Image (tube, rainbow, N blue to C red):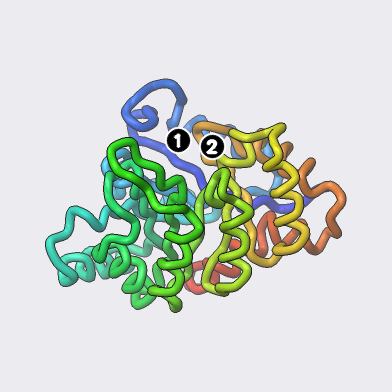
Amino acid sequence: MSIPFFDSLTHVSKDGSWLGRNQFDAGLERLLVEAKRIPDYRACLVNIHGYQDNDHLEEVARRYPELFVPIAGFDPSIHENEKSIRKELAELSERNFAGIKLHPRLNGYDPLDKNCIYTIREASSFNLVVFIDTLFRQLRVMTRHTPDIIDKIAHSCPDSKIVLLHGGGTSMLDVYEVVRMRKNLTMDISFSMMRYRGSSLDMDIKFIARTLDQRVTFGSDFPEYTPKECLDVALRLVENLPENKVENIFHLNLTHVLDDWLYKN
């Protein structure tokens, strides 16, 4: 099947390192080479606060406007008050970022902290889509159940467009039950579908793709996996679906989530 692929999650770093290490090559040149392996490819280029540079991301997105949609790294926990949060959100919007990425685990904060909830809620005022990493487990603190966290966020921020990166990992089917009830949520299946290949999650993903095709998207999580690796696995997971459902999952859903930004650009 030949179909466009709008990759929901890629990262690059200025020095090519990934999360402060050199286990993976996160250089732009590698991603550009990998992107050419897929005929009709576009990607969200996403930063994690403290690990990648938003200035570099802005520069790359300007150089490759047909390829990358820029999603800025954002850490609510470093802000002293709501005014400071609004100021940074406004600046990111003015700089033409399409959204923000929140990573509670790597930045070490509670996703239900008041600053985080305020950030997600206020992002909608600036037409910023919120991408949030849903692998919430942290070593030093007890973590609430992932679907309950997501349900609380969605209830508190009903007007915000939220992309749930990694689909909650091993809690995926419970997250599905939350997503299907809340129209502001989109379920991303990046990383999880690769990490847990061959497990019972394969069946869960097939079920989710079949029954929630208008609210699901796939991503590669480059540099940990390449877009082509992800695409090959994803095509096997949806091989028995009608083409219109595959198109929804592979590019139309993410296009809809980002429609305000895409239309403007």
* Residue drawn 75% across the image and 54% down it: 207
Q: Residue at x 60, y 49 (%)?
A: 189
Q: Is residue 203 left or right of residue 20?
A: right
Question: Is 147 situated left or right of 137 in this image?
Answer: right
Q: Tell whether 265 sits left or right of 215.
A: left
Q: Measured along the vertical axis of the image, is residue 114 above or below residue 49?
A: below
At label 2, counting other C-alpha atoms closer than 10 Å, the crowd grade (few under 14, some 14-19, many 20 or more) is few
> What's under tag 2, amino acid-wise?
Leu
Q: Which residue is mark 2?
A: 32
Image coordinates for residue 3, horizontal then vertical, percent: 76, 52
Residue displayed at 69% across by 54% down: 250
Amino acid type shown at disc 1: Leu
* Percent position of residue 141, x then y: 29, 43
User: Secondary structure beneath disc 2?
Assistant: helix
Residue at left offset 23%, top offset 70%:
86
Mark 1, Cα crowd under 10 Å, few <14 / some 14-19 / many 20+, is some
Residue at mark 1: 28
Q: CA distance from mark 2 to mark 1?
A: 6 Å
CB under 8 Å between callouts 2 and 1?
yes
Tell which of 201 and 246 is nearer to you. 201
Instruction: Tell me the element at label 1.
Output: helix
Quarter where residue 247 is shown: bottom right
Q: Determine which of the numbered discs, if any, sits on residue 119 in the image.
A: none
